[in-house]
Image (cartoon, coloured by chain):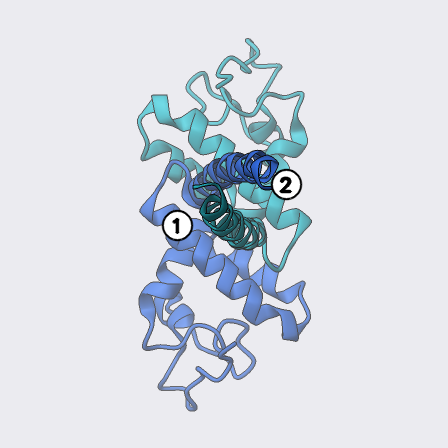
Chain colours: A blue, B cyan
């Protein structure tokens, strides 16, 4: 997980602080994960979850888990922007349908194996 | 999708307005989906997405799609409260692993079918 997106110096706020038009402090919770050169990454997160909620969510996690949390939050936010009705729950439904189809195909193939084995005993 | 959770009268605000301590207007966007007797349903949504963001998301959708949007938002919020690091993206990873396993099992079974058919020609 990339955690070195922070540019040094007050002249380079992270993408979050830039969007929120605030000073990017040295210990900014967003800076390691939302570098200034990826503004859309934070914009979708802010639109869907709100900066304040994400700030709280990250603060409640130990630092070593924040990178993974940001990745999943960014994924969810992008899915919700793409599909405002179902968000990433649409992906879950689609994967569950694939599983149903594969389970049916597997049961058929396994039944055929049992059937064919009768003829070569 | 249940859209009749609204109790009549100013004395029965929906779960959202109750939590936000505001008057529940006759045209409250939350009332059809967050009845007063399910307070936790809105509490998690508010904690994860924020009432203001959910309000905006629902307002941007036609009424007939709001029920499905609320269902997916509630699902995502509950998943994030249960698993603050991965949220419902954890479910997506797990389903993708199941698909990989099933595809491997299916390929093996289909290969065995092809193999067995050679003996009964």
The answer to whether marks 1 and 2 mark residues whose Cβ atoms lie closer than 8 Å is: no
Residue B18 found in image quarter: top right
At label 1, counting other C-alpha atoms closer than 10 Å, the crowd grade (few under 14, some 14-19, many 20 or more) is many
- Asked if one can make out residue A90 in the rendered structure from this viewpoint, the answer is yes
Where is A73 relative to A67, above or below? above
Which residue is identified by label 2? Answer: A121
Tell me which numbered mark, 1 or 2, is placed earlier along the sequence. Answer: 1
**Foreground mark, 1 or 2?**
2
- SS for dot 1: helix
Residue B84 found in image quarter: bottom right
Q: Nearer the viewer, residue A98 or B22?
A: A98
Q: Residue at x 36, y 26 (%)?
A: B65
Q: Which mark is residue B2?
A: none
Which residue is identified by label 1? Answer: A79
Q: Residue at x 60, y 27 (%)?
A: B15
Left or right of B13? Residue A87 is left
Where is B33 relative to B93, above or below? above
Instruction: Please provide percent x and percent y for residue B10.
Output: 56, 14
Instruction: Please provide percent x and percent y for residue A56.
Output: 60, 60
Left or right of A47? Residue B16 is right
Where is B41 relative to B8, above or below? below
- SS for dot 2: loop
Instruction: Please provide percent x and percent y for residue A22.
Output: 42, 71
Q: Chain of mark 2?
A: A
Residue lying farthest to the bottom in this orientation: A8
Residue lying farthest to the top in this orientation: B8
At label 2, counting other C-alpha atoms closer than 10 Å, the crowd grade (few under 14, some 14-19, many 20 or more) is few
């Amino acid at each position: 997980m990339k955690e070195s997106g922070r540019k040094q110096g007050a002249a380079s706020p992270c993408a979050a602080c830039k969007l929120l038009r605030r000073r990017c402090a040295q210990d900014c919770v967003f800076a390691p994960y939302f570098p200034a050169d990826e503004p859309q990454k934070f914009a979708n997160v802010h639109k869907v979850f709100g900066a304040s909620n994400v700030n709280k969510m990250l603060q409640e996690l130990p630092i070593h888990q924040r990178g993974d949390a940001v990745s999943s939050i960014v994924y969810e936010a992008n899915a919700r922007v793409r599909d405002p009705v179902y968000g990433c729950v649409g992906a879950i439904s689609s994967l569950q349908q694939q599983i149903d189809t594969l389970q049916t195909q597997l049961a058929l193939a396994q039944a055929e194996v049992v059937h064919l084995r009768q003829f070569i005993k």
